């Protein structure tokens, strides 16, 4: 959940070692395998079959030049990241969504990689829209318009089959892995303190610079449980080919939104209508199903109250 200025990346890239951390700075999707952990190739949704909807395309501004430039920080799998055979191709469910919106609007889509914190300031000048896991909050809505499209939260993950019989309601005494700089990293120490306050063993927290390292060490058994964003945790199951699974339900859910400039109401209306069309036609749900993640909303609400 991108509540912080920048969250680090996730994917299982290159060799997925069971014995040591990779300390990877940026990671693609897919790759080779080592030992018992196998990194699966990233999925992708075929947006080419989505037809243009003339009534929705007619909502675009009269001076629209035919190209929808979308700002994204391509370091946050499975939503948006560099992938493909060359490791440089914009990939992820947010990227697929941008292309799907382009199909409905009859527009070419250009994905522009940028630092996460720089995207909103560039909306309306450098970028027509921002689609990069932006959590909706009052501070952002005061600055830009936001169209809700997905709900994200936090999840715990364990080894497949939950061999240690862990209960999401009581993880005291476990070894828990988190990625530094994430929302989960902010709150895990409090979870441990809560355990101690009730007389239980504390949680042993292990922090890693990359989400790939967290997942690798869960598969390898160095940690008992992984604590991550819901889509990140669910995608770990896809990337490890079922070697990890979700424990319990998604918690602390909040909507994320497509970002558009407040002084561009026609583009906002066009994107909102296009997003609603994808929802109504079941395309959005199918797209997320392809990625193995949940959270699809069924109403593209403009600036929802959160």
Image: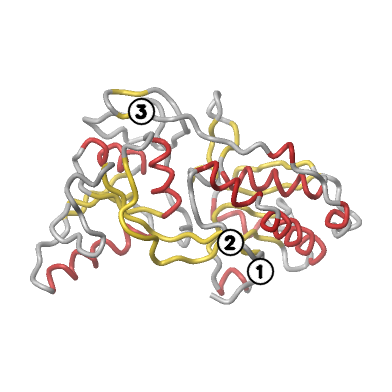
Q: Which structural element holds mark 2?
A: loop
Tag 1–tag 2 contact (CB < 8 Å): yes
Q: Which structural element holds mark 1?
A: loop
Q: Residue at x 68, y 69 (%)?
A: 302
Q: Residue at x 32, y 58 (%)?
A: 248
Nearest the viewer among 23 and 136 is 136
Left or right of residue 96: residue 273: right
State the count of labels: 3
Report which residue position mark 3 lands on: 38
Whether 192 is drawn above or below 49: the answer is below
Q: Is the residue marked by circle 2 packed among few (<14), some (14-19), or many (20+) residues within 10 Å?
A: some
Residue 145: image location, x then y, percent: 68, 67
How far is mark 2 from mark 3, CA to CA?
31 Å
Residue 61: image location, x then y, percent: 87, 58
Report which residue position mark 2 lands on: 297
Report which residue position mark 1 lands on: 301
Whether 16 is drawn above or below 55: the answer is above
Q: Is the residue marked by circle 1 packed among few (<14), some (14-19), or many (20+) residues within 10 Å?
A: some
Left or right of residue 221: residue 5: right
Residue 278: image location, x then y, percent: 70, 53
Q: Earlier in the sequence, mark 3 or mark 1?
A: 3
Q: Which structural element holds mark 3?
A: strand
Tag 2–tag 3 contact (CB < 8 Å): no
Q: State the image quarter where residue 25 is shown.
A: top left
């Amino acid at each position: 959940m991108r509540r912080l200025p920048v969250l680090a990346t996730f994917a299982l890239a290159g060799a997925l070692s069971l014995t040591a951390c990779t300390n990877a700075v940026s990671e693609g999707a897919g790759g080779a395998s080592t030992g018992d952990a196998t990194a699966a190739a990233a999925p992708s949704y075929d947006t080419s079959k989505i037809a243009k909807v003339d009534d929705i395309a007619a909502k675009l501004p009269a001076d629209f030049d035919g190209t929808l430039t979308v700002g994204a920080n391509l370091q946050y799998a499975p939503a948006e990241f560099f992938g493909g055979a060359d490791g440089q191709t914009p990939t992820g469910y947010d990227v697929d969504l941008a292309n799907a919106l382009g199909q409905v609007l009859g527009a070419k889509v250009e994905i522009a990689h940028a630092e996460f914190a720089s995207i909103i300031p560039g909306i309306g000048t450098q970028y027509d829209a921002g689609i990069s896991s932006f959590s909706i909050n009052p501070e952002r809505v005061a600055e830009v318009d936001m169209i809700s499209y997905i709900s994200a939260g936090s999840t715990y993950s364990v080894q497949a089959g939950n061999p240690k019989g862990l209960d999401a309601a009581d993880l005291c005494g476990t070894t828990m892995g988190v990625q530094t700089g994430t929302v989960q990293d902010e709150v895990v120490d409090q979870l441990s303190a809560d355990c101690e306050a009730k007389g239980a063993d504390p949680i042993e927290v292990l922090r890693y610079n990359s989400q790939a390292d967290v997942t690798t060490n869960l598969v390898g058994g160095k940690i008992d449980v992984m604590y991550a964003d819901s889509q990140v945790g669910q995608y770990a199951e896809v990337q490890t080919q079922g070697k990890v699974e979700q424990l319990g339900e998604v918690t602390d859910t909040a909507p994320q939104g497509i970002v558009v400039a407040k002084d561009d109401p026609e583009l906002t209306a066009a994107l909102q209508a296009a997003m609603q069309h994808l929802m109504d036609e079941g395309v959005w749900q199918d797209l997320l199903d392809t990625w193995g993640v949940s959270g699809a909303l069924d109403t593209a609400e403009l600036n929802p109250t959160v």
